[in-house]
């Protein structure tokens, strides 16, 4: 057990994790109490509010929720860490995690809202008229939520160490417990309200910390995002890899990573469900625009934190010995560590850490909602008990939140990779398994259930096989290298979509061509997703195609 926990509790670290900090602790405690209070105030008693917030969320509020949903511990902490250690190569994360939203905006957001279901597996099950397809999609949704949430649990543990002076393990357990509590209580409606609040907290904390570091070190004045060029040059003199993007990684690795993150963004169930929470397709498009704007406000600062953090680590920790060999705990907490090394007041460093907690909580909440809806709505109600009452569905949903929360907490005590790498794996799964099915399901009416089933199974084989090969099996068996090193080179666990997506597209298209066409009512459904006629709050493409009353609300 001691050996398993060694990376987080036994090594010396530059991050001040040993003592209780009163003001930051009170800040986080007040923040957690606020989240629980909002969750209780907006507690739900109907599945419509639990899964899609009654389709009542506006464009700006949904954009803030998209931003908070997206600004996970990986974005808030992990991106700066990866850029500091990998230099320009790490910018693949910024490029991938923003470009995907343009594809969502142009090709998927409005069409998903017009389809008008509750969950991503709900779309797959109805579009491909198959309970098997719904079941596979629900399983994949649970796997993505599980993998993605482990990285958030790791971020929570790190920040609890700094703020409360408690062990990493205790921090994971306490903060995950709070998250499980308010998500199970409030459902999608309260979670969305909390996400808007969490976005305001995290962007203020991140930005104030950035400006304070720049002013205290004399590195910036008004726009630190554009004023850190000289610090990048100084960092490059210390660590050449900082400006040599392909010194330690190949062109192929960069392209594969960026592509996997782009298509993964378009395949994440907890992102797509946000388009079901708004009134109509126009609001879905505008909420995507607002979400991208709110995301960019934070991403612009990650590279700045990376350069400044590297320089401060070099001068204050290693005494000129560089920064590329910082410990995993230091790298994953680099944003907070930068504020600490700049000798900012403890309460201000604590505020930056509180922002990271808000980021991790918001994303974990979104993941737990998507997982619970997949279990309660898609598996329990649609596959097991069609006449399940609302009370039964809500009970199953809340039990799922509790169950997956406990599993994530246990794995989060000893995460198998850096926060950013863990999240990248979930993107690779989403991109390989879901993106081709979503895209072809909305844009090619001749896509058949046989094609979708063959494609998703192929995607699962490729993405999960890649993760088992170079991460899961080596870690839990004590082997240093990948099981099949050559396979890890071309099909890495964090970037398997570059190979996987074209293969899955090909499988779906070929199988769809050689099998019987979809039923006519399914084709009408796909055409309605592209209709220029505006829709009402409770309307879906199915209602428009049938010319009758709303069927899914």
Image (tube, grey):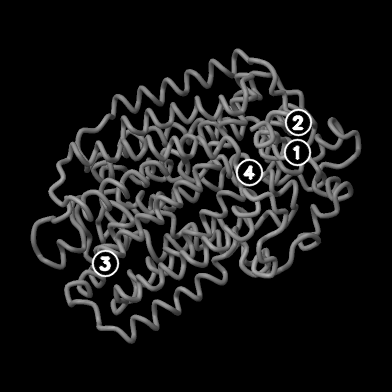
What residue sits 31% from the left and 59% below the top?
Answer: 135
Identify the mark nearer the N-term, 2 or 4. 2
Identify the mark nearer the N-term, 1 or 2. 2
Identify the mark nearer the N-term, 3 or 4. 4
Q: Residues within 10 Å of mark 1 (few under 14, many from 20)?
A: some
Is residue 373 left or right of 84 when viewed as pictured? left
Is residue 327 left or right of 517 when viewed as pictured? right
What residue sits 65% from the left and 30% below the top?
Answer: 209
Task: Kindly indicate whether the residue at mark 2 contacts the one at mark 1 (C-beta within 8 angstroms).
Answer: yes
Q: Residues within 10 Å of mark 4 (few under 14, many from 20)?
A: many
Q: Is disc 4 placed on a helix, strand or loop?
A: helix
The CA span between labels 1 and 4 is 13 Å
Residue 11: numbered disc: 2
The CA span between labels 1 and 3 is 47 Å
Instruction: Depth check: give the residue in front, 520 or 463.
Output: 463
* Residue at the spot of label 1: 327
* Residue at the spot of label 4: 78
Which mark is in front, 2 or 4?
A: 2
Is residue 74 left or right of 210 when viewed as pictured? left
What residue sits 86% from the left and 42% below the top?
Answer: 322
Q: Position of residue 4 (x, y in %)?
A: 65, 37
Q: Residues within 10 Å of mark 3 (few under 14, many from 20)?
A: many
The CA span between labels 2 and 4 is 20 Å
The CA span between labels 1 and 2 is 9 Å
Identify the mark nearer the N-term, 3 or 2. 2
Task: Kindly indicate whether the residue at mark 3 contacts the one at mark 1 (C-beta within 8 angstroms).
Answer: no
The CA span between labels 3 and 4 is 36 Å
Q: Is disc 3 placed on a helix, strand or loop?
A: helix
Residue sitting at the far left: 548
The CA span between labels 3 and 2 is 52 Å
What residue sits 75% from the left and 38% below the top?
Answer: 327
């Amino acid at each position: 057990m001691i050996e398993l926990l060694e990376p987080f509790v036994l090594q010396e670290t530059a991050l001040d994790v040993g003592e209780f900090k009163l003001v930051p602790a009170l800040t986080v405690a007040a923040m957690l109490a606020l989240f629980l209070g909002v969750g209780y105030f907006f507690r739900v008693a109907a599945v419509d509010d639990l899964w899609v917030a009654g389709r009542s969320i506006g464009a700006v509020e949904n954009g803030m929720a998209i931003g908070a949903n997206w600004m996970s511990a990986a974005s808030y902490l992990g991106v700066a860490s990866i850029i500091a250690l990998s230099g320009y190569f790490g910018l693949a994360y910024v490029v991938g995690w923003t470009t995907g939203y343009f594809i969502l905006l142009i090709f998927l957001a409005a069409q998903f809202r017009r389809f008008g279901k509750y969950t991503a597996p709900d779309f797959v099950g109805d579009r491909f008229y198959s309970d098997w397809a719904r079941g596979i999609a629900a399983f994949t949704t649970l796997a993505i939520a599980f993998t993605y949430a482990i990285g958030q649990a790791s971020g929570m543990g790190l920040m609890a160490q700094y703020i409360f002076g408690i062990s990493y393990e205790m921090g994971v357990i306490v903060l995950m417990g709070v998250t499980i509590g308010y998500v199970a209580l409030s459902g999608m409606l309260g979670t969305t309200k909390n996400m808007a609040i969490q976005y305001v907290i995290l962007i203020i904390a991140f930005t104030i910390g950035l400006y304070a570091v720049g002013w205290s070190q004399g590195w910036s004045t008004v726009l630190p995002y554009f004023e850190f060029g000289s610090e990048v040059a100084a960092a490059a003199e210390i660590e050449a890899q900082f400006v040599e993007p392909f010194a330690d990684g190949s062109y192929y690795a960069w392209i594969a990573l960026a592509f996997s993150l782009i298509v993964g963004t378009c395949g994440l169930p907890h992102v797509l469900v946000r388009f079901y929470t708004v009134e109509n397709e126009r609001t879905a498009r505008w909420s995507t625009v607002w979400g991208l704007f709110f995301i960019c406000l934070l991403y612009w600062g990650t590279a700045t934190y990376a350069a400044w953090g590297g320089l401060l680590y070099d001068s204050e920790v290693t005494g000129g010995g560089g920064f590329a060999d910082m410990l995993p705990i230091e790298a994953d907490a680099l944003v907070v560590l930068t504020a600490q090394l700049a000798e900012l007041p403890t309460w201000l460093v604590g505020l930056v850490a509180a922002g990271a907690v808000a980021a991790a909580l918001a994303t974990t909440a979104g993941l737990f909602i998507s997982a619970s809806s997949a279990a309660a709505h898609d598996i329990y109600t649609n596959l097991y008990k069609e006449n399940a009452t609302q009370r039964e569905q809500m009970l199953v949903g809340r039990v799922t939140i509790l169950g997956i929360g406990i599993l994530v907490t246990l794995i989060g005590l000893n995460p198998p990779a850096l926060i950013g790498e863990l999240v990248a794996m979930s993107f690779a799964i989403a991109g390989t398994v879901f993106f081709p099915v979503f895209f072809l399901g909305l844009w090619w009416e001749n896509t058949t259930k046989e094609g979708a089933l063959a494609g998703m199974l192929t995607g699962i084989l490729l993405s999960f096989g890649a993760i088992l090969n170079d991460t899961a099996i080596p870690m839990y068996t004590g082997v240093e290298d990948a099981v099949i090193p050559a396979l890890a080179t071309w099909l890495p666990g964090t970037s398997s979509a570059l190979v996987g997506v074209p293969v899955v597209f090909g499988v779906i298209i070929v199988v769809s061509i050689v099998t019987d066409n979809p039923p006519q009512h399914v084709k009408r459904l796909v055409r309605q997703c592209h209709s220029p006629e505006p829709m009402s709050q409770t309307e879906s493409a199915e209602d428009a195609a049938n010319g009758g009353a709303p069927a899914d609300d």
